[in-house]
């Protein structure tokens, strides 16, 4: 995974926390629906946020992972470099290579990720397992497949679904003026921690026809605010986030949009509607979200002197909504319009088409009940790579970005993310304990 993608994911997690902070009542309602009783809900909320903070906060890599990881990144577009290197893989079998990793909290409070052949599935909260598969399809053509799983505690997938419904229900009932007056008081730690990097510039909750509520959020990232405390992370955000332009729109087969996210440099806007605890289309009468959606992405940024990006990258998304499993599978089978230097696009035509051929690339995420009573958050993705001189060049750009990220930004980014979850955990604990005492 590229450091730019990691950065956007960390920003995304923090933005998700802002969505909670922007609605204190919604956050409280969501937390109290995480169990059958207030006490059980409080325990589940505490374990859930502790697991997320442990996994996505500061962590250590064992010696093997520390050596392997940069080699994986450098070889992402040129897998042949490491395909026959036994030092990288925990298993080699014919045309398939496997690397197995496991993460867990140690007895002294650290979070350690290590190479772990035949690691068992996660059982305890914050336990993590990752399996990276590399398959050689033919000469110069390879397929990457990655499976990640994180245990979130002894709650159930349906608990999280009820919490999300409560979150949307409360958001639909609140007034933006009241929310702004409350969130600093009811979520003081999370507000203060997030405020070191983010500002919530716009918060509008407006009733619309059919009993739905329109929600509009405007969020700005301020790297200068953390420059003294986290200088490497601040510099990285300023360098790679500032020139970025992105828009993601979800729509159904009838063309109706369901939500929209836009990023213009360091400023993001999020627009959606809710009714009775569920998403509603952005226009027209409220109705149940369909089982299939499409998400269109337009994204562009500048890497050194080159502008790179995609337009009209469409994912066909199938939603899973059973009591034991909530999630989605996104499949990419249509080549987008590329933003690349002209000499690159003309020389790598086949290589650009390869990821979308056949079954295409895919990304899935779900939260499901595990066999040992825990709930698991899992992520899978698959993509085919065709090697060429130009993909080597493109990989070189990514390697330069990796070098920038590793120069202190990664450790500082983890530290900030961990602090966000810790602050949110303390605030939510205070709210849920108050609910238990009632």
Image (cartoon, rainbow, N blue to C red):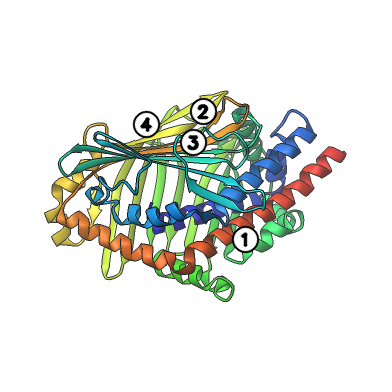
Residue 364 occupies quadrant: top left
> Which residue carries the number 4 mark?
254
Q: Is residue 208 left or right of residue 86?
A: right
- Label of residue 194 in the image: 1
- Find the distance from the CA under tag 2 to the CA under tag 4: 13 Å
Other-residue count near label 1 (Cα within 10 Å), few / some / many at <14 / 14–19 / ≥20: many
On the image, the x and y values in percent for residue 205 come to: 61, 48
Q: Which residue is mark 2?
A: 288
Residue most toward the bottom?
A: 228
Alpha carbon distance from label 3 to label 4: 45 Å
What whole-number distance in Å separates the C-alpha atoms at marks 1 and 4?
38 Å
Determine the secondary structure under disc 1: helix
Q: Earlier in the sequence, mark 3 or mark 4?
A: 3
- Vertical placement of 24 versus 315: above or below? below
How would you rate the neighbour count of disc 4 (Cα within 10 Å): few for under 14, some for 14-19, many for 20 or more? few
For numbered disc 3, what is the local secondary structure? loop
Please identify, in this view, whether the residue under mark 1 or under mark 4 is nearer the observer.
Answer: 1
Residue matched to label 3: 119
């Amino acid at each position: 995974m590229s450091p730019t993608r990691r950065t956007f994911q960390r920003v995304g997690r923090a933005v998700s926390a802002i969505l909670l902070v922007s609605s204190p009542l919604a956050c409280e309602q969501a937390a109290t629906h995480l169990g059958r009783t207030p006490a059980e809900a409080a325990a589940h909320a505490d374990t859930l946020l502790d697991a997320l903070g442990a996994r996505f906060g500061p962590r250590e890599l064992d010696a093997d992972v520390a050596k392997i990881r940069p080699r994986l990144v450098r070889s992402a577009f040129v897998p042949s470099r490491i395909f026959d290197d036994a030092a990288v893989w925990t298993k080699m079998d014919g045309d398939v290579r496997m690397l197995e990793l496991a993460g867990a909290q140690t007895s002294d409070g650290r979070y350690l990720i290590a190479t772990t052949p035949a690691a068992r599935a996660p059982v305890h909260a914050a336990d993590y397992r990752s399996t990276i598969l590399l398959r050689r399809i033919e000469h110069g053509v390879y397929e990457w497949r990655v499976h990640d799983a994180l245990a979130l505690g002894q709650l159930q997938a349906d608990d999280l679904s009820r919490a999300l419904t409560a979150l949307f229900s409360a958001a639909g009932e609140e007034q933006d003026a009241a929310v702004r007056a409350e969130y600093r008081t009811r979520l003081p730690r999370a507000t203060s921690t997030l405020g070191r990097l983010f500002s919530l510039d716009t918060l509008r909750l407006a009733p619309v026809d059919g009993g739905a509520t329109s929600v509009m959020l405007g969020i700005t990232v301020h790297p200068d605010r953390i420059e003294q405390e986290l200088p490497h992370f601040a510099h990285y955000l300023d360098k790679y986030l500032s020139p970025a332009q992105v828009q993601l729109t979800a729509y159904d087969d009838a063309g109706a949009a369901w939500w929209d996210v836009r990023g213009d440099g360091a400023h993001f806007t999020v627009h959606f509607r809710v009714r009775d605890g569920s998403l509603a289309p952005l226009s027209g009468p409220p109705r149940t979200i369909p089982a299939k959606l499409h998400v269109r992405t337009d994204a562009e940024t500048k890497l050194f002197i080159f502008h790179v990006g995609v337009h009209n990258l469409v994912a066909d998304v199938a939603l899973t909504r059973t009591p034991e499993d909530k999630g989605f599978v996104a499949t990419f089978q249509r080549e987008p319009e590329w933003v690349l230097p002209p000499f690159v696009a003309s020389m790598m035509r086949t290589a650009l088409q390869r990821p979308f051929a056949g079954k295409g690339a895919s990304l899935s995420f779900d939260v499901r009940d595990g066999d040992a009573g825990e709930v698991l958050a899992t992520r899978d993705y698959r993509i085919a790579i065709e090697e060429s001189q130009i993909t080597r060049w493109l990989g070189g750009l990514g390697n330069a970005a990796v070098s920038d990220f590793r120069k202190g930004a990664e450790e500082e980014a983890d530290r900030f993310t961990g602090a966000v979850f810790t602050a949110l955990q303390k605030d939510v604990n205070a709210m849920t304990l108050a609910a238990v005492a009632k």
